[in-house]
Image (tube, rainbow, N blue to C red):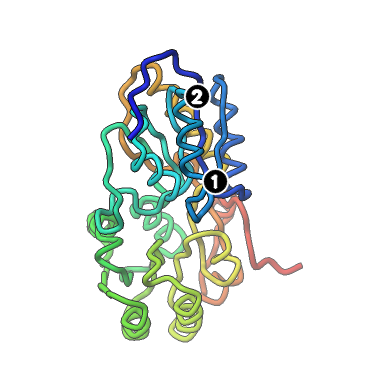
Amino acid sequence: MLAPIEAQADGIAIISHANIKPYQLAIAGFREQVNLPIHIYHLDNRGEQHSAVALDIAQQQPELIFALGKLALNFTRHIHFHVPVVFIFVLHPNNPSSGHQHQPSEFGIAMSIAPAQQFKMLIDIAPSVKHIAVVYNPKKSASIIQQAKIAAKNLGIHLLAVPADNQKMATSLIASVMPKVDAMWMIPDITVLTSTTFKQMLHLSLKYTVVLIGLAPKYVRAGCLFALSFDSHAIGSQAGAMVKRILAGKKVANQVPPNRVYFTLNKQAAKQLGLYLPTSLLKKVDHLYGERK
């Protein structure tokens, strides 16, 4: 454990475990908001450089740490730098079974869009939808399912939430529930959402004329009707704004949803489902797939 910082702190330490495009975009958005010295540290997956990174950060004595990804957040939890941590790109930050224990000095932006926002968009696109199904692992996704049940009730739609402990069970349950509902909701649950189950859902959605609510633009491109997702640059900018509030001593919620939502729609999927897309709706779309050239 490193000693608490007592000397003059020096800027922001950014910890990342990958130099991939979404992280690069997020850091660019973050830099636009934060006018402080920034030091970037990359972690290797095997942990060979972790001690050296920890020592460098302790010597830097940052005012705050910006952690990108699960590995980076867990690293800050294991080392205890005694400064606030702002995190993004972490799927289940509060999951005790995965070793993730939320700390009072941690502040993050959720990776998923609120269920209520997704269901409202579903109703705008397909007003006749009344029954939605979701298959989920209770150990990973209980929190989002609880939110979804409340959202569905408030919107007057029925949510069929079916628990599955493994992929084999998930595959069987998807096959059994899709003929009974109007829409299938995909959530960021790695037990349920795999390349195999996604192909299965695409096939069944066409067979039973079921709307597929995607998780990200790539799923919409592959055949889902729509997806609401976050923009990497915008989420980095939002994290930067959060950092400024924290360092100014202002109150900040420990976890907030993304404030910029990216709306992707598949026009061909809508046609196959017999849905009419009004101009007012199409004006809200950030990217439209399935248009005839």
- Classify 10 Å Cα crowding around label 1: few (below 14), some (14-19), many (20 and above): some
- The quarter in which the C terminus is drawn is bottom right
Marks 1 and 2, Cα distance to the nearest angstrom?
Answer: 30 Å
| Image height of 58 relative to 219, above or below | above
* Closer mark to the observer between disc 1 and disc 2: 2
Q: Tag 2 or tag 1, which sits nearer the N-term? A: 2
| Residue 30 numbered mark, or none | none
Residue closest to the eye, 45 or 163: 45
Q: Which residue is mark 1?
A: 231
Q: Residue at x 30, y 57 (%)?
A: 98
Snapshot quadrant of residue 128: bottom left
Vertical comparison of 199 with 157: above or below? below
On the image, the x and y values in percent for residue 73 come to: 40, 44
Viewer-proximal residue among 36 and 253: 36
Query: Which type of secondary structure does the marked residue at label 1 adopt?
Result: loop
Residue at 65% from the left image edge and 68% from the top image edge = 290
Count of all numbered marks drawn on residues in the image: 2
Amino acid on which disc 2 is placed: Gln
Q: Quadrant of the N terminus?
A: top left
Give the labeled residue for mark 2. Answer: 60
Position above or below: 162 against 34: below
Q: Position of residue 190 (x, y in %)?
A: 40, 67
Depth check: give the residue in front, 115 or 89: 89
Amino acid carrying mark 1 in the image: Asp
